[in-house]
Image: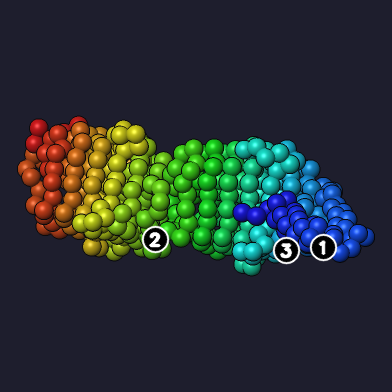
Amino acid sequence: MTPRSYKKQQPFITLFGAFALFSFTLSGCSKDDGPEPEEELLPPIELACDYFSESRVLTNDPQRPVDYLISCWANVQGSLKIEPGVVVTFEEHAGLYVNLDDGVFEIKGTAAEPVILTGTSKQQGHWRGIFLTEAHNENNLIEHTVIEYAGSQALTSTSPVYEGSLALRGVSGTPPQALTLNHVTIKDGGSVGLDFHGIRKNATVSTANLTITGNAGVPVMVSAEMAHVFDHTSTYTGNASDFLNITTANYEIEDQEVIWQKLDVPYLVDGRVHVKKNGHLTIEPGVEIQFLSTGYLQVAPLLPPYAATLKIQGTDDEKVLLKGHEDANWGGIYLGHTQRDNVIDYAIIEHAAGNYPVGNLQNSGAVYMHGDPMLRITNSTFQNMPNYAVYAYSGASSIKPDLPNFIFVSNVVTATKGSLGWGDGRTTHYPN
């Protein structure tokens, strides 16, 4: 990072020092030669609270170590472009409330001249942050930008609450929200780094090459629908809680194919993730997912043709790990009726108690099957289980079900009640 408070002054000091040395060397030849006077550095331009009521362009002034100062929660209603090398400082609790509808929001630095958005005090959580509440233009972009010392307070005062240094509000209707993040650093914030928990699959959102570090919360909050927009090109470590947090908002994966990639932090699932009609979730090798006690995966398309799939695809070298957060019990994996090729291969599953609020199921299995789903489990380990590894619904019958669509090969099980149980999933379980 080279904020212009450093970047602008550093070249000047270097050049001035070199010139002074050159002048000193030649002093024996000319008594009148001496260093030129320093160039005057100007203070930042303070922008009024209504400055962004019309379209604006913020430009780089080489004579200003800090180009602009914002002292309020400014409402951005016109298009806003911030050019390479611009430094903007924010006073305590100041920030940008971006409400520009179809206008363009573009913060575009370069690798050599990033845009710096910082606080007047270099303290974690000094200014409020940036909240995009109405931002529908597909050209919206934040690129080669550093956002630091934000997150002083929540970005909304009523429910739903958005927080963090940068947040994008979720909208269920049209037009959808749009934002591209590329080569963005979000650091030293007073809460979460980036809040995407409200955005829906209709949003035009992409991220790459992010660095989110030094924040007082998790680096990212996001919905299950949109967790796939975060990938291995970014780094999320060095925060108070290093997880990509999948919240309970917008928990359904429907009419979309989603891949959860291996990141440099685990995923943390707060509640239910429901893969339903034409939803397909693939979890790639090396992924670690931790679940709160209320968390579980449900693959249940509900209606014919029962098209929904879960593919947990580890390898011998990079297994997929699913476990309880802080080793506490969590729900597990519920599969209902799905007639597609569901796979659990080279996975380690721990602490899954078989408790699923859907159906009021209690003490069943780490993997629960209802309606004879198609499922193949291979090369996987079930350990630290309080109940069964796999459980099949059989109603009141004590007879072991046939399970013609179930394959269970080359697995290791240390579950308390064994590899396979069946019953009503609530109060009656076999074998006892």
- Label 1 SS: loop
Q: Which mark is in front, 1 or 2?
A: 1
Q: Residue at x 75, y 59 (%)?
A: 18
Mark 2 or 3 closer to N-term? 3
Q: Amino acid at mark 3?
A: Glu
- Label 3 SS: loop
Q: Amino acid at mark 2?
A: Val
Q: How far is mark 3 from mark 1, CA to CA?
A: 41 Å
How crowded pointer 3 is (Cα within 10 Å; few <14, some 14-19, many 20+) is rated as some
Mark 3 or 1 closer to N-term? 1
Residue receiving disc 2: 258
Extreme-left residue of the structure = 399
Q: How does the figure colour the protein chain or chains?
A: rainbow
Q: Residue 333 or 405: which is nearer the viewer?
A: 333
Mark 1 or 2 closer to N-term? 1
Q: Which mark is in front, 2 or 3?
A: 3
